[in-house]
Image (cartoon, coloured by chain):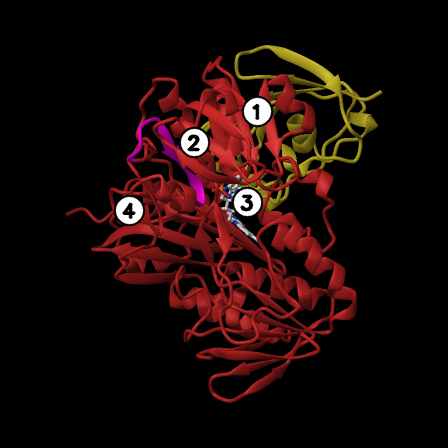
Chain colours: A yellow, B red
Amino acid sequence: MATISVRTRDGELHSFEGRVGASLMENIRNGGFDELLAMCGGCLSCATCHVFVEELPASASLPIPSIDETELIEGSDYRQENSRLSCQIPFDETLSGIVIGIAPED
Amino acid sequence: MTPDNLTRSFDCVIVGAGHGGSQTAAALRQSGFTGSIALIGAEPEIPYDRPSLSKDYLAGKKTFDRMHLRPQDFWGAREVELLLGRHVSAVDPTARTVMTDRGEYFSYGQMVWAAGGDPRKLSCPGSDMAGIFYIRSKADCDALINVLPDAQRIVIIGGGYVGLEAAAVFREIGKDVTLVESLDRVLARVAGEPISRFYENEHRARGVDIRLNSNVASLEGVNGRVSNVILASGGRIAADIVVVGIGIIPSVGPLIAAGAEGANGIDVDPFCRTSLPDIYCIGDCARLKNGAGIRIESVQNATDQATTAAKAICGELRAYDAMPWFWSNQYDLKMQTVGLNFGFDSVVTRGDPVSRSFSVIYLKNGAVLALDCINSPRDYVQGRKLVDSAARIDPAALANTSRQLKEIDLVTS
Ligand SMILES: Cc1cc2nc3c(=O)[nH]c(=O)nc-3n(C[C@H](O)[C@H](O)[C@H](O)COP(=O)(O)OP(=O)(O)OC[C@H]3O[C@@H](n4cnc5c(N)ncnc54)[C@H](O)[C@@H]3O)c2cc1C
Ligand code: FES
């Protein structure tokens, strides 16, 4: 079982079982978190799937963000060191236990 | 109508379960709306991502289960009743009811009309034959995908975003593609000339036969199935299938019949209220009365207007003023648009189109109105701020790519 924990904007943490093979964005959406708009459907055009990676399992690593992802994130007023676009991160077993926060809406 | 033939009664009835309708329901709950909500949709599917239809779904790169805007159980959990496969055919603003094509009546306290649009149909002789396709719904797209294995020669009618995206997909899977556009450039209604010429060159370089200034006079067929597109100039183009992308007609008939103001779209105020009491209208079929009085067809517009309407229903009147943006994907080209270029009086090309990464900036009276950015997310995010502040910048400075947009000084005058 591979779990994902999502902190919603009210600060609450929710854990659920993720679907391996889908992106983190799709998992958050499928988890019913309507705060994440993901308006472009995951095609790296909108940055409305912005999350903060709060905790990463010790052995796990995330794919390096593409230049496009980095530049889109730079447009956010809420950008942090740990900002990512969740549609760009495929979810797999190694990420089980990841904790992410949904960034405020720009 | 008598109360006893009312099937059900809801505090809020949303007509149309696309991008706008589904977001209205979600935003109502987020805003604390505790009344009952019905989301009535003509399509049989739960709300899904429409832009993927002409992109990854048509290309076979994305399965439908990955296009649901929300999971199936989301709607139940939010106590939103999904009433799918029903077309609302009449609205009675006095009795406060809607009637569906199944003969059901639903009464409403508040209503949000989010019915989008139907593809504009070809009207020339022969346009009722088999082998002619549109791309608006999943059903449209599935019908097209089903015949693709047997269709080699495809004629696309209309050089808008949908037609161009479909052309890109068809070339990628090795079809012969001819694109017929009646105006003198593709994307003429939405983009400036440098963008049009760039996409024409890209598509031609990949083998699309683009015919500009070409009107379709008729379609010819064999045994009721299309076989040739006949141009007004007399030209004939052989076609196994024809794909039509010539825009939409807003789905507003029942609301206009009920007395709502509007014509090509329903007129709404900045809170998305129509002229009828407690009826809102959002998305592709809503026409904002202030400003240019235009309809905007984008996911951003439908989603943000949904939130505006939901807030208004919850008593929070906040005028719609979201920053417009849009995207299109063709081949390896990602276009992002910010702002609306209506009424621009000059354009600046920033960067060299040959490099396949550049932006076109639209100005009016020297102020930045909008940008179209091709493979250039940096200009897109930095350009947003210029649009937001209607920045006045020397055009030569805008064109100078040795400095980022955020580093350019404003014209001080
Ligand atoms: C192929 C394609 C590609 C696109 N690509 C992009 C893109 O890249 N980026 C972008 O921003 N936008 C894109 N768009 C536009 C975008 O999809 C629309 O702007 C958006 O879907 C509008 O949302 P809406 O809620 O107004 O309408 P829709 O999403 O069309 O939803 C309306 C729904 O109402 C239903 N309906 C209609 N009449 C009735 C009735 N009387 N009773 C009940 N239900 C009814 C319809 O069946 C439909 O399901 C694209 C559109 C298409 C067709
Ligand atoms: S969903 Fe649009 S960039 Fe991730």
Which comes sooner in the sequence, label 4 or label 2?
A: 2
Disc 1 residue crowd, few under 14, some 14–19, many 20+, Cα 10 Å: some
Q: Are marks 1 and 4 on the same chain?
A: no
> In the image, which residues are magenta?
B275-284
For discs 2 and 1, the disc positioned in front in the rendered view:
2
The residue that mark 1 highlights is A34
- Look at label 4 and name its amino acid: Asp
- Look at label 3 and name its amino acid: Ser
- Give the camera-side residue of A65 and B225: B225
Which comes sooner in the sequence, label 3 or label 1?
A: 1
Percent position of residue B110, x then y? 40, 24
* Residue at the image position 44 percent from the left and 45 percent from the top: B284
Circle 1 chain: A
Q: Quadrant of residue B140?
A: bottom right
**On residue B409, which mark appears?**
4
Task: Assign a secondary structure to mark 1.
Answer: loop
How far is mark 2 from mark 1, CA to CA? 19 Å
Task: Assign a secondary structure to mark 2.
Answer: strand
